[in-house]
Image (cartoon, rainbow, N blue to C red):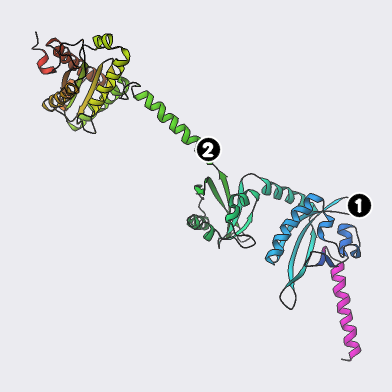
């Protein structure tokens, strides 16, 4: 082939190439490292309403509304920093006549002989029909206060919104790929599990994770490609820190309320209402396990006279001292002590027969005597208590066949009868219900 024919053929190819570039739906362009157009196909006239020579030397952001220019410039700046190709960058542009056209931009980086970035070559496609909807969704995604992100199968963060960037803060590497496997090594296995579940078509569970000083409820949703393969996880991070704090405060408040509901405010012991419930529960257990159950009903001797002589404040102090002495009288962990009313105290002794219960009661009485708390209105000159003791046996409960609350009431009544006998016999002593009937 002659040189002329080769030249003509080459010219035809170039002419054909320019016809392709200038007569299709996509605008082809090149920009330098500063983002200024260095070349443009004629399609720009159709898209922006200006000839190619009017875009040369300008940047894409010169044709965008101010807010949009700032948003896209930020996204493009991150792309340039990583010197990477990009696609699907949706943006609004203002035509020469003032109307808006929505473009989808894609590009590849260009490098000089030294490997330095010298610009980008790419295309813009008119997607105005769908673009507004896409931009609306992108705006919603970007500005929602809930942290959103997408993680690929290698653990890379491929998409995130402003709330996610705030969540990660300075802990995420700047200008580089973010790998959750290194960023959150203690939680990466959860995401691996989600990928496995998604591959199997199973529902992904929500999880509660702590990230530094915040608590998040996270939910992963599988992202699939056209072949229905799972290529990533779309993850929602809902900050539930304040809710957890509120729940903790509520739990603490409920605990305090329960404390007030179950305890006597003066002595700190269980109150009568709680001990009535506790006694029924212990009777049930004694019946099931065929164990004995004993109760001791103690009363401070001449307590009304103590109040009248020493004053009500001293009387309150006296009740606290007696309560502390009762609980420290070598009782077992399963034993319960309550202020049963006024100056009366009830001790429940599970798995304790009458002989053992009498021994416990005698220790308690002796410990009160050992206090030698002055009581000028008592014949002894110091504080004493009287105690009545009553016992139930598992088999006896079954034989009685009464409702549990009646059995409990009967047990307390027998202990009270024994206490009355102790009072009648001179106080400062222990009497069992078995012996109470012998008192004249």
Magenta-colored stretch includes residue 383: no
Instruction: Please name whichever residue, 375 or 142, is drawn nearer the observer in this view of the structure.
Output: 375
Q: Which residue is mark 1?
A: 97
Relative to residue 150, is residue 258 depicted above or below?
above
* 214 relative position to 330: left or right: right
Q: In the visual, does 291 lie left or right of 39?
A: left
- Cα separation, mark 1 vs mark 2, equals 52 Å
Q: Which residues are magenta?
A: 1-26
Picture quarter containing residue 122?
bottom right
Tell me the residue at 38%/24% (across/down): 260
Q: Residue 201: give x, y in percent of width and height.
A: 52, 54
SS state under label 2: helix
Query: Which disc, if any, is residue 243?
Result: 2
Tell me the crowding category of disc 1: few under 14, some 14 to 19, or many 20 or more residues within 10 angstroms, Cα based: few
Residue 95 lies, in percent from the top left, at 87, 54
Where does the image place residue 374, in percent across and percent down from the top left? 21, 16
N-terminal of the two: label 1 or label 2?
Answer: 1
Magenta-colored segment: predominant secondary structure: helix
Q: Looking at the figure, which quarter contains the N terminus?
A: bottom right
Q: In the rendered structure, does residue 18 fall within the stretch colored magenta?
A: yes
Quarter that holds the C terminus: top left
């Amino acid at each position: 082939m002659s040189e002329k024919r080769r030249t003509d053929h080459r010219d035809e190819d170039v002419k054909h190439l320019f016809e392709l570039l200038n007569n299709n739906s996509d605008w082809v362009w090149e920009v330098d490292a500063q983002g200024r157009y260095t070349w443009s196909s004629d399609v720009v006239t159709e898209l922006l309403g200006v000839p190619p020579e009017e875009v040369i030397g300008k940047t894409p952001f010169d044709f965008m509304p101010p807010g949009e220019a700032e948003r896209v410039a930020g996204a493009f700046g991150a792309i340039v920093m990583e010197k990477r190709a990009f696609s699907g960058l949706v943006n609004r542009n203002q035509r020469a006549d003032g109307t808006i056209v929505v473009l989808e931009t894609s590009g590849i980086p260009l490098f000089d002989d030294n490997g330095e970035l010298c610009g980008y070559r790419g295309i813009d496609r008119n997607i105005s029909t769908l673009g507004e909807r896409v931009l609306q969704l992108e705006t919603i995604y970007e500005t929602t206060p809930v942290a959103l992100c997408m993680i690929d199968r290698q653990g890379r963060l491929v998409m995130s919104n402003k709330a996610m960037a705030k969540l990660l803060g300075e802990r995420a590497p700047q200008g580089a790929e973010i790998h959750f496997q290194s960023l959150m090594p203690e939680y990466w296995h959860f995401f691996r599990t989600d990928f496995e579940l998604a591959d199997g078509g199973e529902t992904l569970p929500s999880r509660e994770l702590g990230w530094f000083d915040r608590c998040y409820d996270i939910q992963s949703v599988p992202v699939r490609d056209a072949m229905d393969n799972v290529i990533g996880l779309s993850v929602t991070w809902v900050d539930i820190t304040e809710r957890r704090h509120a729940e903790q405060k509520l739990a603490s408040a409920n605990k305090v309320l329960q404390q007030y509901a179950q305890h006597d405010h003066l002595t700190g012991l269980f109150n009568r209402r709680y001990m009535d419930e506790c006694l029924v529960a212990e009777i049930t257990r004694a019946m099931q396990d065929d164990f004995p159950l004993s109760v001791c009903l103690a009363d401070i001797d001449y307590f009304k006279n103590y109040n009248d002589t020493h004053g009500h404040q001293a009387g309150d102090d006296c009740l606290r001292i007696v309560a502390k002495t009762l609980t420290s009288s070598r009782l077992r962990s399963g034993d319960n002590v309550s202020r049963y009313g006024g100056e009366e105290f009830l001790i429940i002794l599970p798995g304790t027969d009458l002989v053992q219960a009498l021994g416990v009661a005698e220790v308690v009485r002796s410990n009160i005597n050992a206090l030698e708390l002055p009581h000028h209105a008592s014949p002894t000159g110091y504080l004493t208590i009287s105690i009545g003791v009553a016992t139930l046996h598992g088999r006896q409960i079954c034989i009685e066949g009464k409702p549990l609350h009646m059995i409990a009431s009967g047990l307390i009544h027998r202990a009270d009868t024994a206490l009355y006998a102790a009072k009648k016999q001179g106080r400062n002593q222990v009497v069992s219900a078995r012996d109470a009937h012998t008192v004249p």
